[in-house]
Image: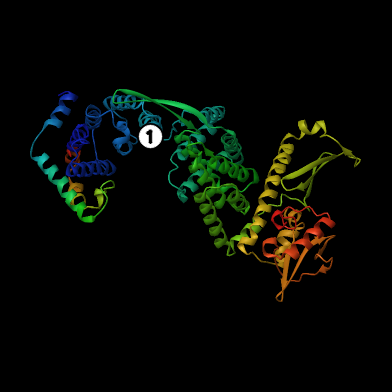
Amino acid sequence: MYLIKNISKYNNSDRYHNYDEQKNRINSVELAFVQQLFKAKLIVNDDDIAIIHNAVILNYNKDFAPFFSYWPYQSFFNQIQNQFKGKEISETLKTTLNSIKSDLEQPSNVYYNKDKLKLIEKIDSILFQSSNEINIVKPTLFLGEDDFSEFANKIIERLNETEKTIWYKLITKAQKASGSKPTNKYLDETKLLFKKLGADKFKAIINEWFQFVIKYKEKEKTSTTEYSGRIYTHTYYEFISAINIEAIKGFVWMCAHFHDNVTIHNIAKLAERCFRKIPNVGPASAAIGNACLYTLYKSKGLDGIGQLSRLKLRIKQSSTQALIEKYLEEAAKEQGISIYEIEDLAVDDFDLKKGERIWEFDDYKAVFKITGIGKSEINWYKPDGSQQKTMPAFVKDKFSAKLKKLKDATKQIDQMTSAQRDRIDRMLRADRKINWNNFNELYLQHGLMCFIAEKIIWNFTENNTTNTAILINKEWTNNKNEIIKPSANTMVSLWHPATASVEEIKIWRDFSIQQQIQQPLKQALEKYIY
Amino acid sequence: MGIFDKIKSTLNIKNESEKEFEKVVLNTLDEFKETGGYFYNIKVNNLNTYTQNVIIWQDKKRFRL
């Protein structure tokens, strides 16, 4: 109380005009003491709680940040919660807590909404615990005042009571997602919870939420605050409220246990959305974006790593690129291979064979085919083998889920061909050399990579001799139309006009025109050679 | 005694304990100066005044502080 009195007195004094270094330092020590006293165990009675809050409110300078932001209210409530856990609380304390709640609910700058809502939730939780059995779960929904809460809470409210209870627990856990990485304890505890629910049910709902965020466009909002008797209005962009960002981050972390295509793809899209910049603000939500990168790195299998490799080219912020690079390096270290090899291994082939895949719908067939970088087509065939111009009508009704998968795969493959083309383009800078066996397996025999690799000019080096060739009629052919036969000792690297002579570039240019080769990369027809 | 009287009395008491509290704060300040730390980020739980003195006080006394 002594400290609260002194700090309040100092804050209400004319400290800016009559600045005193010693007084300012004493004030800092006093504030540090208050924070520490609330952090350490301190037994307080009902009256003490009321006295502390009233002392704060009565002496508080309203021109400061809101009282709950200045004073360590979070620690204060933690004390109360620990002290009264499993015990019934008195009417006096209930009145005090409700009075604090009503003080918290007073309008304040939108910047403090997250802290405010967290504290209100804490009070509700203390009041709920005291009037209910310890094993009864408090209904917890998304707290933020935004469109996401409205969307996500409606989904929860539609569920049965058993499922709702598990979601309440999951949301409570998610709302505590702080820091840059989840702890193992957090991941284990949440895994137990969603296992109770069923991983598929869990994924279905969170993927719906992720989709909502991916498609959501930030909104322009206006906030009004009062300072020194004047009303100030300012406009700002809100993507998702700060408190929901924390909760979504928690749910993204929980996905580190999964490696299915849909979830991984959604998390990668979510990362892309969250790193997209809002004018005058910066990335829409770096916190969710970073959580996505972590989850992609930690997810089982190599699909997540494949998406990280793609995001490295899509996200421009240097700090984010450094983070992706760090995760890729760590993943490579764990596997005992280089960062480039892990990127090679992580490319999903989407079950393609030579750039094609057949999807069956009863006796009808949909033949998916890559036609270019970022381009593909689907042709429909009747049971008799003849082509049908449009999709058969029954497919939409009878195979809606399968059709959705086909459409999703199409989008993902289109994105992936562009990303992989760009990755190959970076090989020159990285001075990447691949041995023939790996090149054959990870590029030429790969359902998706073969489409790109077969149209690129490569250097084949063996015994200090380098031959440059492209695949023509299934044979590696140099620009003099001679066949090259690589062996297990051959090292393959990207041929690039930047390292070739003008003469050689001209020959390749003429050769590619003559052979009518449409290259995914500007090699032979690179503009700057003219 | 009503709650406001309690607050009033708590805030207006000028006694020995206040002098002791003042001394604790000043000692902590001196101790902290010696660490060379920044004043915007003081952690009293690393300082002797707190760990050897304040922490062993009874709850009531710490509440008064």
Closest to the observer, A224 or A126:
A224
Report whether B63 appears left or right of A509.
left
Closest to the observer, A421 or A504:
A504
> Secondary structure beneath disc 1?
helix
Coordinates of residue A296 in the picture (x, y in percent): 57, 49
Location of residue A30 (image quadrant): top left
Coordinates of residue A424 in the picture (x, y in percent): 67, 57
Q: Is residue A289 visible?
A: yes
Q: Is residue A121 visible?
A: no
The residue to which callout 1 is attached is A115
Vertical placement of residue B34 versus A376, above or below: below
Coordinates of residue A135 in the picture (x, y in percent): 43, 35
Location of residue A130 (image quadrant): top left
Identity, as a three-letter code, of the amino acid under mark 1? Asp
Closest to the observer, A69 or A451:
A451
Vertical placement of residue A356 versus A209, above or below: below
What's the chain of the residue with tag 1? A
Q: Residue at x 25, y 28 (%)?
A: A57
Within 10 Å of disc 1 (Cα), the crowding (few <14, some 14-19, many 20+) is some
